[in-house]
Image (spheres, rainbow, N blue to C red):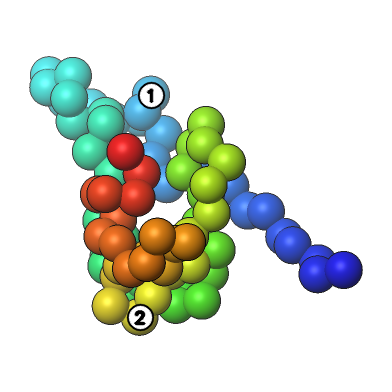
């Protein structure tokens, strides 16, 4: 059996954001930035919050899912 490690990363604490713009708390880093920072890497299996579908992160920032290669925006909708 494959050992799967689930990691939840709290990237931004919305309570610590000081802004008058309520939408600012919902702007998260893009996947390419997270890859650059080393938070995620190609080959990682991603599961969107409150979803069960899995997708493998590719080096170009897209994901590979059963339907084929997709952009991150498409795969989490």
Q: Residue at x 31, y 38 (%)?
A: 77
Q: Residue at x 52, y 37 (%)?
A: 51
Residue density around tag 1, few if under 14, some if 14–19, many if 20 or more, within 10 Å? few
Residue 23 picture location, percent across and down: 17, 25
Element at badge 2?
loop
Give the residue pinned by disc 2: 59
Q: Earlier in the sequence, mark 1 or mark 2?
A: 1
| Distance from the alpha carbon under mark 1 to that under mark 2 | 33 Å
Give the answer, above or below, for where 63 lies relative to 12. Answer: below
Give the residue pinned by disc 1: 15
Q: Is residue 72 visible?
A: yes
Residue ranking furthest to the right: 1
Q: Residue at x 30, y 55 (%)?
A: 72
- Which mark lies nearer to you, 1 or 2? 2
Residue 21 picture location, percent across and down: 12, 22
Give the answer, above or below, for where 14 lies relative to 39. Answer: above
Name the one closer to the observer, 36 or 42: 42
Name the one closer to the observer, 70 or 24: 70
User: Quarter holding the N terminus?
Assistant: bottom right
Asked whether, in this view, residue 14 is left or right of residue 51, the answer is left
Give the answer, above or below, for where 19 lies relative to 63. Answer: above
Circles 1 and 2: CB distance less than 8 Å? no
**How many labels were placed on the picture?**
2
Name the one closer to the observer, 49 or 18: 49
Name the one closer to the observer, 37 or 74: 74
Residue density around tag 2, few if under 14, some if 14–19, many if 20 or more, within 10 Å? few
Q: Image quarter for residue 35?
A: bottom left
């Amino acid at each position: 059996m494959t050992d799967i490690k689930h990691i939840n990363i709290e990237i931004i604490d919305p309570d610590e954001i000081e802004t008058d713009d309520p939408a600012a708390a919902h702007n998260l880093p893009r996947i390419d930035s997270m890859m650059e920072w080393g938070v995620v890497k190609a080959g990682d299996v991603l599961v969107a919050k409150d979803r069960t579908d899995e997708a493998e992160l590719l080096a170009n920032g897209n994901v590979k899912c059963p339907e084929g290669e997709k952009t991150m925006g498409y795969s989490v909708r």
